[in-house]
Image (spheres, helix red, strand yellow):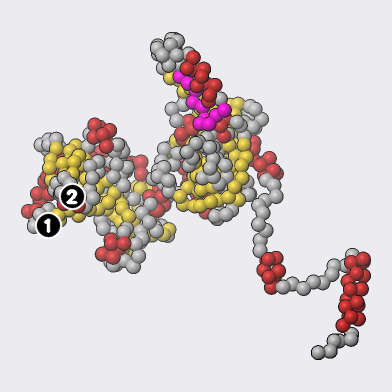
Amino acid sequence: MTSNPFLPVVRKTVLAATMAMLTAGVATPHLVTPALAQEQSRPPAHGPASVADLAEGLLGAVVNISTSQTVKGSEGPGAVPMPQLPEGSPFQDFFDEFFKNRQGKKESGPQKVQSLGSGFVVDAEKGIIVTNNHVIADADEIEVNFSDGSKLKATLAGTDTKTDIAVLKVDPKAKKLTAVKFGDSNKMRIGDWVMAVGNPFGLGGTVTVGIVSARNRDINAGPYDDFIQTDAAINRGNSGGPLFNMDGEVVGINTAIISPSGGSIGIGFSIPSELAAGVVQQLAEYGETRRGWLGVRIQPVTDEIAESLGMKAAKGALVAGVIKGGPVDDGTIQPGDVITKFDGKDVHEMRDLPRVVAESPVGKAVDVELVRKGAEQSVKVTLGRLEDGEKLSKEEVKQTKGGDAVATASVLGMTVGDLDEAARAQFGINADVAGVVIREVDPNSPAAERGIAAGEVITEIAQESVATPKDVMDRIAALKEQGRKNALLMLASKSGELRFVTVRMD
């Protein structure tokens, strides 16, 4: 193969031209390979260059919450109460040693216990501040400390234990306030940058940055769990502080962490603004929440239940019972229905329904899509008020108790008894759970075969409420007279979670 005699000349010409363009400051053309093109199309791997400007404009709206609680003094060793320092505080060892040395000294009077948390201003004109309920719970005095060093006394406007949110009020005329606004937490995606501001370990305003690690987290903190998980450093004392998006809007309220030591390990949880904003508005306006109420008891839809109902997939919330006097006590919704959509919002699993119902206005007429006996249909429901429904449920339990008193009864291999305060304390049963407690289960009984355990509560038998051991005996006897071979029980766990169980009666 002969060489091309013109190739050296071409190379020299290209080189000379390139050097000329470099000398003249002209950009040189270059070849782009497929691999290089793909690399150039990728987004930058680094985070934001700086959040200094963003933080500077927001620090004035974030506050430290200082509370004090008066505890009764007494005489004797250890009478002086130790301050409630944030876990991991550098002063912990000092106070431990100090209070040990004071043992044996007498206490002459009441003492005040201090605690710290975070919060943020959402309405400068009205002096409205948001924090966590657990930050101010049982406090006698609440003081708000601002980033400029000023302080104001605060009064409690309202609290909501279900979402752990509290609203405070300060005098807006005493100081010019800076407020922040809620953003749309629904727009936050996993991987989006967020910034947390708060009062960790009582150190004062602290800024940390991270990303949204996960959404829709259920950590069993309450009935409406839907937390944003973030790896932005959140520590003790950050509770009640805001989680900002990169537009400076509040997309979450920092409220909990997972940590064996009390320090951040990169797993923090924030109440999403979608849930918090409505609660804050109601607490500020009414001093209480006004949630929608459907008046049904629900349980998860398992694969077995879905198959038996002719559903293609296990989704929705199974109606386990209807509360008497509730919004759907007229037969609009019936036990055995599976609710799949509420007011245009899909109900993928059981825990979705209480949240979307609670977020709906009281008195609103909504469309509910459900599956009944294998057929899909839509019904119209006018919502009641949850707080009224809770009172109604308690009153219903009181009215159903009566007749000949029976302390305990043995049925279907179970020993059942009244759900009194002693039983609640013994088994750790929540105050809002009603029915008949199961005290013992024979390990060789049909009940044991179905996984029923002591401490569970029978709330219904064959879709009828039971409140006393006598009610249980009467219902089982009636089923046997009807020739039934199985009893359908609705059981409540200690925390109130419901499930259906069938037990043989032979």
Q: Is 379 in front, or is 198?
A: 198
At label 2, the amino acid type is Ala
Q: Pinpoint residue 292: horizontal percent, then vertical percent.
A: 38, 47
Q: Which residue is mark 2?
A: 447
Q: Pinpoint residue 248: horizontal percent, then vertical percent.
A: 63, 46
* In this view, 273 is above or below 100: below
Residue 493 lies left or right of residue 116; in this view the side is left
Q: State the CA–CA distance, disc 1 to disc 2.
A: 14 Å
SS assignment at label 2: helix
Say which residue appears at 26% left-offset and 58% top-offset.
Answer: 336
Q: Pinpoint residue 303: horizontal percent, then vertical percent.
A: 31, 62
**The C terminus, quarter of image:** bottom left
Dividing the picture into quadrants, the one containing residue 346 is bottom left
Magenta span of residues: 81-90
Q: Which residue is mark 1?
A: 485
Residue 170 visible from this viewpoint: no
The crowd level at tag 1 (other Cα within 10 Å; few <14, some 14-19, many 20+) is few
At label 1, the amino acid type is Lys
Task: Assign the magenta stretch its main secondary structure.
Answer: loop
Q: Which one is closest to the eye, mark 1 or mark 2?
A: 2
Q: Pinpoint residue 257: horizontal percent, then vertical percent.
A: 49, 41
* In this view, 193 is above or below 310: above
**The N terminus, quarter of image:** bottom right
- Does the stretch in magenta take in 83? yes
Dividing the picture into quadrants, the one containing residue 338 is bottom left
Say which residue appears at 52% left-offset and 35% top-offset.
Answer: 236
- Does the stretch in magenta take in 311? no
Q: Is 83 in front, or is 174?
A: 83
Q: Earlier in the sequence, mark 1 or mark 2?
A: 2
